[in-house]
């Protein structure tokens, strides 16, 4: 039994899981501390999830083979055993659990953001909620003044403090004379060493647990020193700056100060991707829009960025042999003639295909551009 953090690598791995037999049980559990902050509340939500899984298996039983039904019942039992035994909610705002006994799949993923409690039974792991979480990205806030530094990590919804750095930097005072000049140079050296140490700690943190975007809080006069000492990998991740009481602000106060940066960065990233899509469509190159054209591009592994209108769902078809994807209406795969399987939601299949070819997936939440284009589009590599 493996418990993992959600990473791009883990998400791609799940997107590529296609068991040759049996169904995959995907369970999502909401652990939002504002709703499920007590053991009793979490236990109630877990029981509700497992009861829903039992009902879903019974509801699906007419369309399942005997072996598939037995395996799903075993998977629900294993999930129940896990949640009643080794499960821990510590540090998690959500949990995803994927089970498929025929291929020995049983993996839990701890989530840094809440998800809707949900049960899905399908041919593959249901990864759309995870893709939405990764689309939002992982954030870091670094606060640095002349003697103190603090590092917070998390998501746009919640953050936690993971580092505090305090250095013994002498206070500045005016006495005059050559000795004063030497003293001041000594203080500046101490400040520079402190900033360098903070930047090194921040980079090591990123190497251990990478974050996507960075927010900096520092006094204006210190900003050139901070910017100079940050590793280039960190500088390219800077989304904005905030002004807070670096030594005394609470985590909640820091998080609230950073929210406008989070929101502006999401809007900017979404807008840039939509602009690339619209430019490509206008020129007739390197872009596709509408379900059929986007699915064709995914089948041909040409997608660099997949854009999906938030909440968009659509039925479709998939070839169980070659993976060809298409909208509803066909009965045979145009590539190899295999009988196609109906997909209740081919958008999730599209997301899995995009992740499998290392494409970025963006859920468009703030702009209406995708609506007239069929609610789905893609920027193409070629």
Image (cartoon, grey):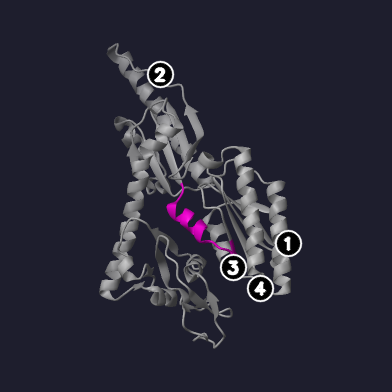
Of the pair 50 and 217, the residue shown nearer to us:
50
Q: Which residue lies at the image location 34% right of the left edge and 43% below the top edge?
A: 261
How busy is the neighbourhood of tag 1: few (under 14 within 10 Å), some, or many (20 plus)?
Answer: some
Which label's residue is closer to the chain start, 3 or 2?
3
Which label's residue is closer to the chain start, 3 or 4?
4
Which label's residue is closer to the chain start, 1 or 4?
4
Label 2 secondary element: loop
- From the image, which quarter does the N terminus lie in? bottom right
Would you name the residue on which mark 2 appears? 170
How busy is the neighbourhood of tag 3: few (under 14 within 10 Å), some, or many (20 plus)?
Answer: many
Marks 1 and 3, how far apart at CA: 17 Å
Q: How many marks?
A: 4
Residue 6 image position (x, y, % from top left): 55, 53
Q: Measured along the vertical axis of the image, is residue 194 above or below residue 83?
A: above
Of the pair 334 and 224, the residue shown nearer to us:
334
Quadrant location of residue 216?
A: top left
Marks 1 and 4, how far apart at CA: 17 Å
User: Does the image show residue 209?
Assistant: yes
Residue 96 image position (x, y, % from top left): 59, 54
Residue 74 — which label?
1
Mark 4 or mark 2, whichever is nearer to me: 4
Mark 1 or mark 4, whichever is nearer to me: 4
Residue 317 image position (x, y, % from top left): 51, 77
Marks 4 and 2, how far apart at CA: 76 Å
Would you name the residue on which mark 3 appears? 124
Of the pair 136 and 61, the residue shown nearer to us:
61
Most extreme residue toward the left is 282
Identify the magenta region: 120-138
Would you name the residue on which mark 4 appears? 62
């Amino acid at each position: 039994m493996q418990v993992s953090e959600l990473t791009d690598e883990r998400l791609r791995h799940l997107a590529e899981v296609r068991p040759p037999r049996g169904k995959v049980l995907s369970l999502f559990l909401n652990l939002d501390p504002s709703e499920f902050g007590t053991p009793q509340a979490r236990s109630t939500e877990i029981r509700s999830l497992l009861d829903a899984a039992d009902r879903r298996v019974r509801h699906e039983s007419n369309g399942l083979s005997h072996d598939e039904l037995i395996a799903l019942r075993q998977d629900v039992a294993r999930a129940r055993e896990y949640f009643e035994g080794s499960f821990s909610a510590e540090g998690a705002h959500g949990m995803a659990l994927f089970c498929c006994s025929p291929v020995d799949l049983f993996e839990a993923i701890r989530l840094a953001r809440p998800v809707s409690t949900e049960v899905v039974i399908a041919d593959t792991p249901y990864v759309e909620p995870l893709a939405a979480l990764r689309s939002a990205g992982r954030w870091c806030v670094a606060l640095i003044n002349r003697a103190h530094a603090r590092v917070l990590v998390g998501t746009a919804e919640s953050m936690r403090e993971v580092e505090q750095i305090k250095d013994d930097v002498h206070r500045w005072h005016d006495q005059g004379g050559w000795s004063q000049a030497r003293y001041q140079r000594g203080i500046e050296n101490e400040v520079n060493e402190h900033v360098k140490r903070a930047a090194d700690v921040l980079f090591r943190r990123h190497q251990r647990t990478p974050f996507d975007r960075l927010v900096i809080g520092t006094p204006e006069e210190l900003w050139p020193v901070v910017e100079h000492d940050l590793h280039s990998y960190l500088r390219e991740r800077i989304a904005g700056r905030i002004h807070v009481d670096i030594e005394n602000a609470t985590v909640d106060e820091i998080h609230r100060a950073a929210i406008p940066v989070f929101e502006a960065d999401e809007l900017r990233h979404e807008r840039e991707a939509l602009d690339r899509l619209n430019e490509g469509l206008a020129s007739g190159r390197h872009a596709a829009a509408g379900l059929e054209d986007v699915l064709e591009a995914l089948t041909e592994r040409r997608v660099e960025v997949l854009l999906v209108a938030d909440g968009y769902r659509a039925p479709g078809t998939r070839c169980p042999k070659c993976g060809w994807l298409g909208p509803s209406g066909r009965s045979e795969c145009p590539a190899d003639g295999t009988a196609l399987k109906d997909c209740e939601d081919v958008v999730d299949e599209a997301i899995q295909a995009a992740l499998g070819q290392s494409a970025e997936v963006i859920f468009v939440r703030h702009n209406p551009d995708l609506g007239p284009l069929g609610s789905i589009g893609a920027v193409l590599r070629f």
